[in-house]
Amino acid sequence: MRSESLFVAAIAVGLNLTMVGGVAAQTKPSTDIDRSATLRFVWTGTPAQYDPMLSKNQFQDMPYMFPVYDSLVRLDAKGQIVPDLATSWSFSPDGLTLTMRLRKGVKFTDGSDLTAAVVAKNLTRIRKDPASLMQGQLRTMESFEAKDPETVVIHFDAPNPAALYALATSAGMIASGKALDEGVNIGLTPVGSGPYKLISSGPQGANYERNEDYFDKSQNQFAKLTISPVIDISARLAAVQTGQADAGLFQVDQQTLNRVNEMVQTGKFFVHKAYQPNSLPLWFNTKIKPFDNIKVRQAMTLAIDRNAISQGITNGECKPAGQPLQPGVVGHDESLVAPAMNVAKAKALLQEAGVGPFSFDALVSAQEPTMSVGLAMKAQFEAIGITMNIVPTPSVAIRPQFRGGTHGAMVTSASVPAPDPASIIDAYFMGGDNPGGVTPEFAKAVAEARTKPLDSPDRVARYKAISKMAYDDPRQIYVCWSPVLVVARKGIVGVENEAYLDAAPLPDLRTYGLQKGP
């Protein structure tokens, strides 16, 4: 577990720097918890809908789905797979079947039972329904079989041990089979087995109340739960500071760091930090000239002063990056250090490529710190004769626009559903965010690495090789590993048990509670 300081020593007193993680074992609720309390949480996204298979933006929808649905498995504090609806599992020797035993006695909020047939129905729907937008996450899964009421068997068309990570996301969330059979619109009225029940939802956020029949009382310690979208980071922090909210999630920029410091020093607030595979990269569209030329991409990588960006924008909290896999993830290679800025070499590479001064349009996420990173990159590219025209774009719209293929680049964070190299490499290279695709050699290496067992030394070596290929042939410019902060008022507990945030900044509030007291 990484333990980098969040702030300088002068303000470190009182900060709990434990990385957030998930709790899956069934435990008794603490007698010190006020189970009559309400949690008010603020974050960036609005609730769109609640059907696991229909997420147009999985990362906006999942935080609103976590309270109402259980998944087959979850992630713990270290990003390890742990039980949820499935209590145990095993792969066949050839890796083509995964057998999962289900938790006994689980009921959905409509009173119906969890069975293997219900799980098979849900997974088949997500994998095979033409309307499903989550098919890709289960793409190696061929069919689903209810072996008996408590045993579900997943059949693969090729070995894919990393599929367990997909089952910890919305792709593995299980809805009531009765609701699906009766045609209930679970996008509007979700029926899950989770620790809370949705009461209302709209542009102003979502309201929940406790599911009193939930199997793990440590996962629903509030009587009521509210998640409210506040897109502006300053307004979001103000909501916590003024008592309008109890906690919120924040990305790091200098102004936010200063304000959080002031809040912590009052003794009324605390903060948790997690690093994520969010290097705030510039993504190239290699279909557009001159980005189809590897030497141009290499030159632009050398034009970036990562240390200056980190110090100037995040007070050094954004750790310089040069590869797609962050520290702590299988395949991260310590020898692939972030390239130092070298203007002379960058100019020489452009000359070798036969490319003179040029300009290009880049979509840049309008939120901080991404916009400041984009502005810094623009200034640094000018030193090698390249003009980057910034097109400010809302974060929810940037990817769809970039995938349209008319812009040369985008600058936005990289969010993935799981802290596993297969998920991260897919997010960076194997989907629509990389319009130019990859080389056949790269695609072959990714396909072969995917089949290796999660604890296999061969898997580590193969993903290190993939990281080296990405380092030598940059399809993105990696800038720095950016942390996210959970800022909460004193008395809120369980944040250290929250589902793993290193993959993506997705709040999962099921472990939160409020201590009794004045």
Image: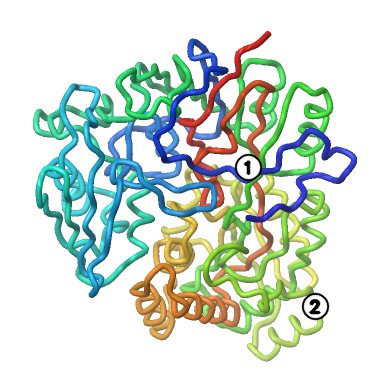
Q: Residues within 10 Å of mark 1 (few under 14, many from 20)?
A: some
Quick check: can you spot residue 290?
no
Disc sitting over residue 367 in the figure: 1
- In the image shown, does 65 or 118 lie closer to the viewer? 118
The residue lying at 23 percent from left, 44 percent from top is 102
The residue lying at 66 percent from left, 70 percent from top is 322
Label 2 sits on residue: 343
Q: Residues within 10 Å of mark 2 (few under 14, many from 20)?
A: some
Q: Regarding mark 1 in the picture, which secondary structure is present there?
A: loop
- In the image shown, does 51 or 487 lie closer to the viewer? 487
- In the image shown, does 66 or 134 lie closer to the viewer? 66
- Please name the amino acid that badge 2 sits on: Val
| Residue 299 figure quarter | bottom right
Measuring from the top left, give residue 346's x and y in whole percent.
Answer: 74, 81
Q: Residues under labels 1 and 2: Cα distance?
A: 29 Å
First reached walking from the N terminus: tag 1 or tag 2 = 2
| Residue 282 figure quarter | bottom right
The residue lying at 23 percent from left, 52 percent from top is 100
Contact, mark 1 vs mark 2 (Cβ under 8 Å) = no
